[in-house]
Image: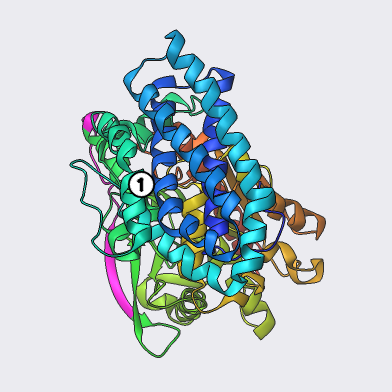
Amino acid sequence: MPLNYETQPGDVDHLIADDHAIVERLFQHLEAGRGNRRVLVDQVSFELALHAFAEETVLYPIWPEIGMTDEHDDAEHEHQEIKEMLVTLGRGEPGQEEFERTLTRLMQVVRHHVDDEEQEELPEFRAKAGAERMAELGGRFLAAKRQAPTRPHPHAPSEGVAERIAGLLARPLDQVRDTLSGRKEEMATDASGLLTPQAQAIADAHSSLGPLPLQTLTPEQAREQPGPDDAVKEVVAERGLEGPEPVGSVEDLRIPDGAGGEQTLRVYTPADAGDGPLPVVLWVHGGGWVLFDIETYDASCRGLANKTGAIVVSPGYRRAPEAPFPASHDDVLAAYRWVAANAATFGGDPARIGIGGESVGGNMAPATVLQLAEAGEQLPLAQVCVYPLTTAEQFGESMADAADGRPLNRALLSWMAMHAFAGRPDAARDPRIDLLGLPAERLRAMPPTLVVTGERDVLRSQGQEFARHLQEAGVETTARHYDGVMHEFFGAAAVLDEAEDAQRAAAEHFLNAFGAAVAALPSAPRG
């Protein structure tokens, strides 16, 4: 669960609590006897190895300086015991007596360690070191994870007592990571056993591509890692399927962004376009405002274009941290206004426009509607929010039971917010982000809405809560939930039945609204 005091996403104590939540959920899978026991233990070992090195490098050297000597000594003693147990687990196999005994002991020690840190040591540290230091230490904590020991063991730096101590303490971690190196292709999969076979194949394919933990990287490094679309393409290729799904045409336009510059608007015309102006769907891609682009969500747009018979347009908005909040929101709003004014130039019908998106795209769609409503402008006829982010708070049960989810886990969610809201700590309370904080009278501006959620997704609870708020406000709302699937599943229709169903549900939702708009038009006078 989140800490019982307020933190910012990039604060060191916030990042530590995220790591704790991920490991606790992995423990729960092991205790329940589900999933791949070997991989789950390897993932626990990997998480704890990085976490221990970062704490020993960044956090613990400060504790004696501020009067936390006893806490420092206890924590380092527990870390040393944990690392020795990780080495034992790496050398053994599930089912062996020593392996299972060591695993049981590891869970006990880690849970005691976590309870001490979250209930006593981290609050004390924040109070003594000062809240203003937490973000700076958070940045160092992530940098330390990037530099965690690998084989061969690096020499300890020649300067800095903390670094020399960390170098000595890190030696058992080399053994842990050496053991795991032979199984690295499994480290990024979902080993919980809770995914459907098709979804598991996608998770395994993504892991086989060897992605590094995005939440430890810089944004530039993270953008170079394989994305969810690469995983789907891998499965498509393995099955000998053809891709991408053909459409009538794909064209990139240059349109204004929200800051006086330009952005790309990708325009997908369906395969069977038919005659006359077509309805338009503005589809907003995800990526936490930091990662991914219109290429990543190409499959979603192609599927929606063909299933709706509408022109789908996708804006390539600016991303953080180069352009932090509200740049992305401003660009999406600018794109909607441009489409409403210029739809006819690319064969669209300005009277029939829908809006939607995935992840943070599912946040920016309703945020755009709110701004249009406030300005008294034309609203979309329907919206679709696919696993939307609707609050910056760590909201609901899914923050615990999907903390370890792939490709989005709780630590990566915090990393995204840390960069997206850089320099804007007030952004989390902005109504464009905090959709769950909106009063009913503002929510009533929303058009008929479909909200799609998946079981193994940290955003599941807040998406479902948003649907409930809309329903209570009197908005025509449909909530569609899929068990056994992960965040970013919507674009995988080529190889995932739930994605195909979700795309069809989204298409039906838009088509109902577009059809109602046509039916409402006055009949032409008879001659």
- How many tags in the picture? 1
> Which residue is disc 1 drawn over?
228
Give the image quarter of residue 31.
top right
Q: Could you tell me which residue is drawn at 57 percent across and 58 percent down?
A: 13
Look at the image and say whether residue 494 sits in the magenta stretch: no
Vertical order, 387 against 436 (above or below)? above
Location of residue 522 by image quarter: bottom right
Residue stretch rendered in magenta on the structure: 238-254
Between 5 and 511, the one lying in front of the other is 5
SS under mark 1 = helix
Name the amino acid, label 1: Pro
Identify whether 443 is placed above or below 228: below
Question: In this orientation, which residue lies closer to the viewer: 110 or 367?
Answer: 110
**Picture residue at 57% right of the left edge, 43% below the top:** 21
Q: Position of residue 279 (x, y in %)?
A: 48, 64
The answer to whether one can see residue 510 in this image is yes
* Residue at figure coordinates x 36%, y 29% from the top left: 201
Residue 322, how many percent across, how many down? 37, 77
The C terminus, quarter of image: bottom right
Point 31% across, 49% down: residue: 167
- Residue at the far left in the pictured view: 152
Give the percent coordinates (x, y) of residue 72: 54, 51
Q: Considering only vertical position in the picture, is 56 above or below 375?
A: above
Instruction: Name the one closer to the observer, 460 or 401.
Output: 401
User: Could you say which is closer to the camera, residue 489 or residue 210?
Assistant: 210
Q: Position of residue 349 (x, y in %)?
A: 48, 71
Q: Is residue 272 visible?
A: no
Residue 370 as seen in the image, left or right of residue 317: right
